[in-house]
Image (spheres, rainbow, N blue to C red):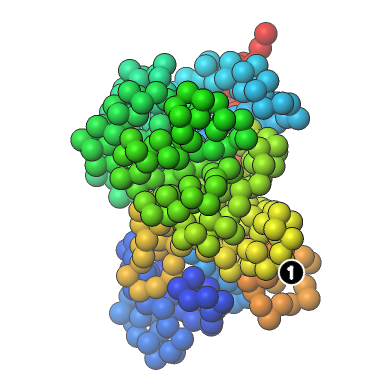
Amino acid sequence: MNLLISNGTVLPMTEKDKFFKAAVGISGNRITMVSSDEAEIESFRKSNPDLTEIDAQDKVVMPGLINTHTHVSMVLMRGYSDDVELMDWLSNHIWPLEAKLTNSDVELGAELGIAEMLLGGTTSFIDMYHYDHAVAKAADKTGIRATVSPFFLDSRMPLFMEDLEKALEFCKGKETLNVMIAPHAPYTCSDDAFKVGMTTADKYDLNFHIHLNETAGETPGYIETHGESPVRHLEKLGLFSRPTVAAHCVYLDPEEMDILAKHGVTAAHNPKSNMKLASGFAKTKEMLQHGMNVSLGTDGAASNNNLDMWEEMRSASLMQKALTLDPLAIPAYTALEMATVNGAKAMGMENELGIIKQGALADIILVDLKGLPHHYPEQPNILSSLVYSCRASDVDTTIVNGKIKVRNHILLNTDIDSLGQRCTERLTALTKK
Ligand SMILES: [Zn+2]
């Protein structure tokens, strides 16, 4: 299918603070034209007589948002356990419930989470969960772009291998699906487990996705047993020789930031989860100054409680201003970069995703700025409206890989009421005493 998005304000994310009126042409799954020239636009119409044209008057046309760290199926546990101390939350609430989840629960939760993400303009996500092949299945069904990361920890090696093989088999040859390997965290994986993970990553040529330095308590204990911090130890083990997405990175010293920057490690920053679980404030401004790539994630909905990347952008900016007492710490354009171009780098798809330019993949969203009270008075600077005022529900259209998934704020081919009802029934059954 070919598409023409006309009359919109295009925010290409290719040059700082730049946006302009233009039309975007899509042929198949690629962007083939970005133009303000009426003759060129007309010629695109003529050469594609069967195209679908979307009038984007009063809308921003921008790259789809990239959620680089989530456990999407945890939407099943949304609101299940809030306002609880972290270890109590994990040990007595989340882990016992997760132990009961089946493949089909993981797939069902993923369908609901993906519906929420697509409606809010998220077009790609990187997941980490039990039975992540079931998340890949849900992603394939809905058409969202996804990288799934079957995870291991010391007690889960055989299950991990089984999950990984299933994920690789399912994702093989599917252009919107990818696989990473996820060591759960330094404190749950021994060196031997890491070595198995690295050999497996070499065998299948896969990148890594890990939780790193999420809480203040992790590093002192790790230094006691390993003689050095997780970042320094993992570097010596050779983990970072492959592209790595490290979720959280709340506690890093400047030297560790240099190590991660040197190896091109992405910090997937999850500001809302870090605040809700009282984990702390990641120093994203400093990480960027040290040359690290910093992207954004929602983490699982049990610690958020939604998968809204607009709230993450706004929180990332506000948290850093408050932390550094510097109102310029993460300006609007930087927050947008974290949610788009930096996310594309995390996925290993730099120049393919997170931007609007000729040749890039057609993952595009249209955002309403008219008719909504929270966007008035009209701002000449749309960046400010997008980061500081926008809501997920302002997303009018979501296109993934050239295919329309959301139009006029409606997710196509999905009955949200019935999907939500099935999730409610399943949670009730799972939590029955
Ligand atoms: Zn996580």
Closer to the camera in the image, 4 or 269: 269
Closer to the camera in the image, 422 or 62: 62
- Give the structural element (helix, strand or loop) at label 1: helix
Give the residue drawn at x 51%, y 48%: 268
Position of residue 382 measured from the top left corner of the image (x, y, whole percent) = 64, 74
Q: Which residue is mark 1?
A: 375
Compared to residue 56, the image places residue 86 above or below, namely above
Give the residue drawn at x 71%, y 54%: 323
The answer to whether 275 appears left or right of 108 in the picture is right
Position of residue 203 measured from the top left corner of the image (x, y, whole percent) = 20, 35
- Tell me the quarter of the image containing the C terminus: top right
Compared to residue 29, the image places residue 414 above or below, namely above
Position of residue 344 measured from the top left corner of the image (x, y, whole percent) = 42, 57
- Give the farthest residue toward the front: 227
Residue 304 visible to an observer of this rendering: no
- Give the farthest residue toward the left: 203
Position of residue 53 measured from the top left corner of the image (x, y, whole percent) = 46, 72
Give the residue drawn at x 46%, y 79%: 23
- Tell me the quarter of the image containing the N terminus: bottom left
Give the residue drawn at x 51%, y 20%: 101
